[in-house]
Each structure stands twice: as structure tokens, then as C-alpha cells.
Image (cartoon, rainbow, N blue to C red):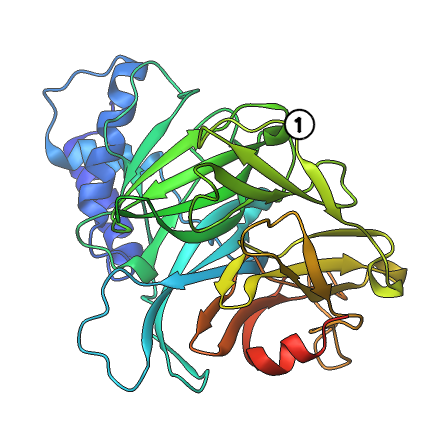
Amino acid sequence: MAMDMRTCEAELALVMQDFGGRHWQIHAVHLARYEQIRAELGLENRLRDTRKSLIGAYFCHEYSYAAAALMNPSIVVHPDQTGLTGGAARVVMSVRAVGEGHISSIAFREGIVTAEGEITLLPEPPIAMAALPCDPPVGGIPEGPVSACRSPDASLSGTVIFPFTVAQKNGLEDLRLVRFVHDNGEIVYYGTYTAYSGSRIASEMLVTHDFRNFDLLPMSGSAARNKGMALFPRKIDGQYAMIGRQDGENVWFLRSDELLNWNGGEMILGPRFPWEMVQMGNCGPPIEIAEGWLLLTHGVGPMRKYAIGAALLDKEHPSKVLGRISAPLISPSDENREGYVPNVVYTCGAMALGRRLFIPYGVADSSITFCSVDIDELLSELV
């Protein structure tokens, strides 16, 4: 505030010289940041934009949201399927990105998957933009539900959702997206994820219709205190249904009359084969096929080696397991075992495209790759 205007102009010019070419919206960001802190610092509002912008710059910094790790993708059919032919589908993929301070955020990529299981990703902009609260909070960090809005100037592939609340302070982890069809035909995209405060975890729900506006909603009940919940894409016998991991070791089936309240459950799968003896869990929402519900699982074996497996659940009674594969579907190889967390392959959700299963998966928590599997061949391996 004591700086003379000539110095203010010179310092702001240096900021713009360093960063103006990297962030085309930087002036607006600086002014918005000034408004956020003005009340807290008791600053007067009758200042020139130059001084406001420079003050805002002193309270900003760049953040490389995926500099530490990139992992655990999930994938759903995009709301917009116009202009596609030959059995191809436009898709939305979520990824867990980890940056400085080990803060996890949710990022997105758009792409097109062909009927043969080949993917083309849309270009990713060099600078991403954070989704912001649709209604700026009053009185500090919010504790309850939050609605976040994507910037009208940002593509979905250039949008990141950072933590907003006290419960989310240290990260939004492992979003499991599902395209949910309600009984009346309404389509809503839900995504369960883990909110991490730095000392406690809790399950929460992302809700969106268009991937422009996102509601982040806390969940309640004894089952919501655990990681790895995955929602079925429709109701079963009039109830919502989930796959979860109540005890940190086995796979559980849960029902609820309320989308955001989950209790109890029934254990349906436990470690059986050597590659899953340490623990099991789901690898995303169950996928409906003609034969039942195809469920990807993860197993942890010796030396904390993660692998991806599969099981088939009965369509009418999903707590009944019809079969499971005895050997991993995907496991780390010598070419891809090294990384931020070695010996890990993991996915938070796949999709069926015709009779092919398309799976994005994380490799050593350091990169994302893709594979597709013939569903009939997969089912032939069930025991």
C-alpha cells in the first residue's frame, strides 16, 4: 500500500513479462484474488486496478497439479455423442492428479474410443483452470456441500477440481464415475470419491449433468467411513446399490433407499487366489452386460503387488457371484513396474462398448494407459 504508483507499475510489468504469456486470463485472476482477500486484510476498495492486480499477484502462485503423480482413472460415455459413426463413442475420463504437498485433485480428459478399442484423446491445454465455487463462500472454508462451476473459458480437458472443504483439505481421491439412469429415464453422472482431511477419510459424492457444474456432497452412514465405494448404474429392486470395502480386505454389496446414506452390507468376495491374498477391492462401478454385472476388482499380493481381476455378479441378485477369474487380467510387467508407487496397476472404472471392455488404468501411479478386452473371452475364463 505504501509503494508509489511508478514502482507498482514497474513491478506489475515484470509480473506480466514473466507470466502473461503463460496465463492469458492472469489480470482477471489477480483482480479476483484481490477481492477474496480485501475484506480479510481490511483494504480499501478505492484503489487503481494496477495496485489491486499487484496485490493479487503477491497472493498467487502457479501450482503443478500433476507433478508428483497421476493415477486411478475412470471412464464414462460423454453426454454429447453427436457426429460419431461406426460404433465409436465420445468419452470422459477422470484422473487423480497429485501435486506439491501431496494434494490430490480431480482432472478430466475427453476422447473418442472406436469399436475396436482404440482411443484418441483430445488435446490438453498447457495451462489448466480450477473449477470455482458457484457461490463464493462467506466466512472462511466451507464444511458442507459445495457447488463448483467450470470456467466458461475452459475446456473439460483443461479443468481441475481442487479441495474446497475442511474434510477435503488434503485431497479428492479416486473418483469412480458412473452414468446413472433413473427409473424415469433421467441421466445423471455420479462419482464416489474419498475426501481426505489430512487425518481422516470420508466418502463423498460428485453429481453432474453436463460436466460444467458439479455438486460435491458428503455421504453419511457407517459404510461411508470407508474408501472404495462404487455405485451401480441403476437401481436394483427399487434401491440404490453399491460395491464397497467395509473391512479393508473383502468386497461388499450394499443397498440403500437414500443416495447419500449407506449402512450395513453383505460380504460377497474375499481373497482366494495368491495374487489377492493381502486384500481385495473394486476397480470401479459394476458394468451391466447381458450375462449379469461385470465387476473389475483389484488384488494385492506379495511385495504389495497390485493386479486387476474380474468377477461376474447375478443381474437380479448382485450379491450372488457367478464366477471370477483365477489369474490377473492386468498385472505389472518389467516395463511398467517402476514409478511413484512401484508394482501397481489400478483403475477406478471401465466401460463396455459393444462386446469389448475398454479399461483405462494407472501404471505405478505415474501414468495412464489403456487396454481393451473381448468380453466373451473374459467370461470364458471365469471359474
Number of labels in the image equals: 1
The residue that appears at 27% across and 26% down in the rendered structure is 36
Using the rendered view, name the quadrant where residue 276 is placed. bottom right
Looking at the image, residue 356 lies above or below residue 157: below
Q: Residue 220: percent from the left, percent from the top? A: 53, 24
Using the rendered view, name the quadrant where residue 347 is placed. bottom right
Q: Residue 134: percent from the left, percent from the top? A: 24, 33
| Front residue of 227 and 285 | 285
The residue where tag 1 is placed is 199
Amino acid type at mark 1? Ser
The residue that appears at 64% across and 75% down in the rendered structure is 379
Q: For the residue labelled by badge 1, is the local secondary structure a helix, a strand or a loop?
A: loop
Q: Residues within 10 Å of mark 1 (few under 14, many from 20)?
A: few
The residue that appears at 39% across and 58% down in the rendered structure is 108
Q: Residue 146: percent from the left, percent from the top? A: 35, 29
| Front residue of 63 and 352 | 352
Q: Residue 213: percent from the left, percent from the top? A: 26, 43
Q: Is residue 374 visible?
A: no
Looking at the image, residue 325 lies above or below residue 199: below
Give the left or right position of residue 183, taking residue 240 as reference: left
Looking at the image, residue 374 lies above or below residue 285: below
Looking at the image, residue 30 lies above or below residue 352: above
